[in-house]
């Protein structure tokens, strides 16, 4: 039941006035524009923020790029569209992203150039207007053609060449008019052209053998449009500045700094040191030293433009696509042992309860005594012996205080296993493992959180520009969904209380030792909003912190580099500070790097899916132990226990009986037998299909019989695809995926 609109505070516009104002504007509108239009003062702005939040919870408003507002269920004033149809010379576009129930709106494209300039699949930034009882799109900027390339496997058929897209969502192959130098079975990029029904493609780049393990990450890089090559000017600039002297700095080389990272870490951008405070019993002094990337990468430089475009480094099992050239990311900026390195040092004064009493930032030079792995640090502390015990012990002692503060504020305590792909010397998959979570991981995480909080508060104190890392509380809609789900398990979620992480922690604690723990954890995760970057601080719900910024990883995140620059400017720490022009475009930068972060996460996840599918491709026809991870009206998804690899079990394979989907309980139930399939349920399933190219898997019940055919025949190629000698014979182009 929706909440009745509350009465606006004096001076505030009512809800309809806000909706009318947004509807009449030709450009994007945010809270600032609304406040200015209605002449609101400081106190009114606080009430306006609350009113807008209520309108979003009620579905009357939604946020788009840049935290701009638009009518609920509608489109932003400016958004990205894709041409979906061309009828009688008129291009019809749909939103490039549409996450609402029901079909996306169709917009007439009003082209200011010659008729028919846009082709099928073209993407462009457009201004949206209501016109003639419908929606019209006025193109503002055509997106780069390279974003329209299709990645797939080239196939030779009797009637000509065709491209089988690697995207699981692709519904059809593409006829290829010009294969260039490519051969059948090659992984290629093709540029589509023409209009329906005569759309063809031209091969523009040959990427090689799609079945080599190193191709899996390459597929994700191209599919997501991740920049992965540096131009010559950027590389030359990196080589030049990597050699520059470190300049005048605070000398901290006498302190025994350590970096503690994963054993397979490709760079080291944070080092830590701590010791008891000699002047205050029970208190501690700690320093979190972070690679001083802002000293090397200056605003407006070729390096800076490249780093901003990438937004972040992307990590795959077999490679890393770095934000900065390796001469910086893996050498000059990496805090390798026994080498002088430039850092931005965050000096922390911490009391016995873990409270940050004070902080200051300096540019310094350090010399790490060692780069050690989490496992080595943990083993040293567990045994109470080892070369680095004298350095680790005070770190752990200080962490005890930080842990006390963390336990007191009760951040969200979701325990989500992290899969790790293990490769052999040839780069082939040797197995899938789950990273063990050690106390050492939490030690470093809590030091990083403390430094991030200090950076955010320091910039707030100076009223300086900052890109905050924000995570908003769950929406009322999502809380209602969680409440309905918990009721199916006999649990209750009171809706009147203020949402806090501790509420979710209690839900998880109640389920901890039961059969539904993994299911409950996933449901709690789905309830959370996605974290993002913004110059406007709205706090971090998951960490239960009022002010939080990313400061500790400038080698691999552009957000941290901006924070370093702002600290350098605000506290007069030397060259490389934030420029006035950067300050003006901070909102756009925050939106861009939020996008690149999501892009990286999707690419990393898709690559893991491909590795898992490759690992399972030798087991097609086998019956495996699985757990159901999702249920829908068309079937359910399951993952192999201890391995991963979500795949679909279509409802059509469950037998002649009709199955009904209970959305609240997330259950498929047979109308005659009462057989139920629910999230978290464990069962044995037969693996029917596994495509390393798409990462798609399909299962069926063992008693249904293997639709893949007898095991001796399952490797027979189909659809005209002929594998090369030594190539995996799992056919490409499997259409059924897990999403």
Image (spheres, helix red, strand yellow):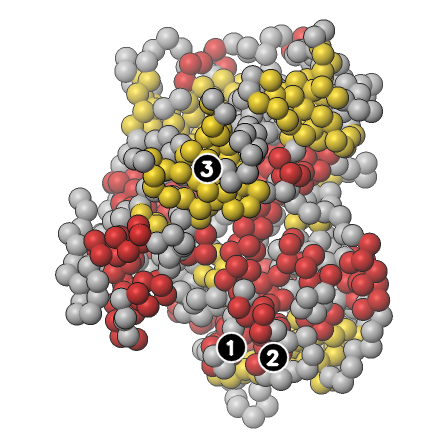
Can residue 17 be seen here? The reply is yes
Q: Which residue is mark 3?
A: 110
Vertical placement of residue 694 versus 481, above or below: above
Q: Which secondary structure lies at badge 2?
A: helix
- Along the viewing direction, whichever of 381 and 739 lies nearer the viewer: 739
Q: Nearer the viewer, mark 1 or mark 3?
A: 3
Residue 70 image position (x, y, % from top left): 35, 50
Vertical placement of residue 212 versus 671, above or below: below
Residue 85 image position (x, y, % from top left): 48, 26
Can residue 734 be seen here? The reply is no
Q: Which secondary structure lies at badge 3?
A: loop
Q: Which residue is mark 2?
A: 569
How far apart in space, not on screen, are marks 2 and 1 (Cα)?
A: 9 Å
- Along the viewing direction, whichever of 173 and 324 lies nearer the viewer: 173
Q: Residue at x 72, y 12 (%)?
A: 160
Which class describes the residues within 10 Å of circle 1: few (<14), some (14-19), or many (20+)?
some
Residue closest to the far bottom: 279
Q: Earlier in the sequence, mark 2 or mark 1?
A: 1
Q: Residue at x 48, y 11 (%)?
A: 704
Marks 1 and 2: in contact by CB < 8 Å? yes
Q: Earlier in the sequence, mark 3 or mark 2?
A: 3
Asked where in the image residue 22 lies, by quadrant, the reply is bottom left
Q: Earlier in the sequence, mark 1 or mark 3?
A: 3
- Along the viewing direction, whichever of 415 and 135 lies nearer the viewer: 135
Q: Which residue is mark 1?
A: 464
């Amino acid at each position: 039941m929706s909440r009745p609109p509350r009465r606006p505070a004096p001076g505030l516009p009512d809800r309809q006035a806000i909706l009318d104002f947004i509807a009449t504007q030709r450009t994007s509108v945010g809270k600032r524009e609304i406040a200015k239009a209605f002449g609101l003062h400081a106190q009114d702005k606080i009430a306006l923020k609350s009113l807008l939040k209520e309108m979003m919870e009620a579905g009357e408003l939604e946020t788009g790029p840049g935290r701009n507002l638009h009518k609920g269920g509608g489109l932003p004033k400016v958004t990205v569209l894709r041409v979906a149809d061309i009828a009688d010379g008129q291009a019809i576009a749909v939103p490039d992203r549409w996450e609402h129930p029901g079909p996306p709106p169709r917009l007439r494209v009003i082209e200011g150039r010659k008729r028919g300039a846009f082709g099928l699949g073209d993407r462009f930034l457009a201004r949206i207007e209501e016109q003639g009882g419908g929606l019209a799109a006025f193109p503002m900027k055509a997106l780069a053609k390279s974003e329209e390339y299709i990645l797939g496997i080239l196939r030779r058929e009797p009637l000509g060449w065709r491209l089988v897209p690697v995207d699981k969502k692709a519904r059809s192959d593409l006829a290829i008019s010009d294969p260039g130098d490519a051969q059948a079975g090659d992984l290629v990029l093709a540029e589509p052209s023409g209009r329906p029904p005569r759309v063809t493609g031209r091969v523009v780049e040959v990427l090689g053998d799609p079945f080599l393990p190193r191709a899996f990450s390459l597929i994700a890089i191209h599919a997501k449009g991740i920049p992965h090559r540096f131009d010559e000017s950027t590389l030359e600039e990196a080589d030049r500045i990597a050699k520059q002297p470190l300049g005048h700095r605070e000398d901290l080389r006498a302190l025994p700094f350590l970096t503690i990272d994963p054993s397979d870490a490709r760079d080291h951008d944070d080092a830590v040191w701590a010791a008891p405070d000699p002047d205050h019993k029970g208190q501690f002094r700690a320093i979190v030293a972070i690679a001083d990337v802002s000293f090397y990468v200056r605003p407006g430089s070729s390096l800076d433009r490249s780093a901003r475009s990438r937004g972040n480094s992307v990590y795959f099992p077999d490679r890393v696509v770095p934000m900065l050239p390796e001469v910086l990311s893996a050498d000059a900026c990496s805090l390798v042992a026994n080498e002088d390195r430039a850092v931005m040092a965050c000096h922390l004064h911490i009391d016995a309860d873990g409270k940050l009493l004070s902080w200051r930032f300096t540019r310094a030079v350090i010399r790490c005594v060692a780069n050690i792995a989490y496992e080595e640090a943990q083993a040293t502390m567990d045994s109470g012996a080892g070369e680095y015990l004298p350095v680790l012990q005070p770190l752990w002692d200080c962490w005890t205080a930080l842990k006390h503060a963390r336990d007191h504020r009760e951040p969200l305590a979701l325990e989500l296993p992290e899969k790790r792909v293990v490769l052999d010397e040839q780069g082939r998959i040797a197995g899938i493992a789950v990273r063990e979570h050690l106390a050492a991981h939490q030690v470093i995480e809590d030091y990083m959180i403390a430094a991030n909080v200090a950076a955010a508060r320091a910039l707030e104190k100076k009223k300086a520009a900052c890109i905050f890392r924000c995570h908003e509380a769950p929406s009322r809609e999502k809380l209602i969904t969680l409440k309905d789900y918990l009721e199916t398990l006999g649990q209750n979620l009171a809706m009147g209380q203020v949402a806090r992480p501790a509420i979710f922690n209690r839900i998880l604690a109640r389920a901890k030792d039961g059969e539904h723990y993994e299911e409950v954890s996933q449901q709690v995760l789905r309830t959370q909003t996605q974290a993002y970057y913004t110059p406007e601080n709205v706090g971090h719900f998951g960490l239960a912190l009022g002010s939080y910024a990313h400061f500790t990883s400038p080698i691999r995140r552009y957000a941290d580099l901006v924070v370093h620059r702002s600290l350098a400017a605000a506290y007069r720490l030397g060259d490389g500070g934030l420029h006035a022009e950067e300050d003006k475009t901070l909102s756009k930068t925050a939106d861009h790097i939020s996008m690149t972060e999501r892009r990286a996460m999707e690419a990393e996840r898709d690559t893991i899916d491909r590795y898992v599918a490759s690992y399972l491709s030798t087991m097609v026809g086998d019956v495996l132990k699985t757990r159901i991870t999702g249920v829908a009206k068309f079937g359910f998804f399951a993952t192999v226990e201890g391995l991963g690899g979500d795949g679909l079990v279509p409802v059509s394979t469950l037998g002649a009986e009709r199955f009904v989907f209970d959305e609240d309980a997330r259950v498929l139930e047979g109308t005659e037998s009462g057989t139920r399939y629910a999230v978290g349920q464990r069962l044995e399933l037969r693996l029917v299909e596994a495509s390393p190219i798409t990462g798609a898997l399909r299962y069926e019940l063992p008693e249904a019989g293997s639709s893949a055919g007898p095991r001796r025949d399952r490797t027979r190629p189909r659809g005209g695809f002929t594998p090369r000698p030594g190539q995996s014979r799992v056919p490409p182009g499997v259409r059924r995926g897990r999403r």
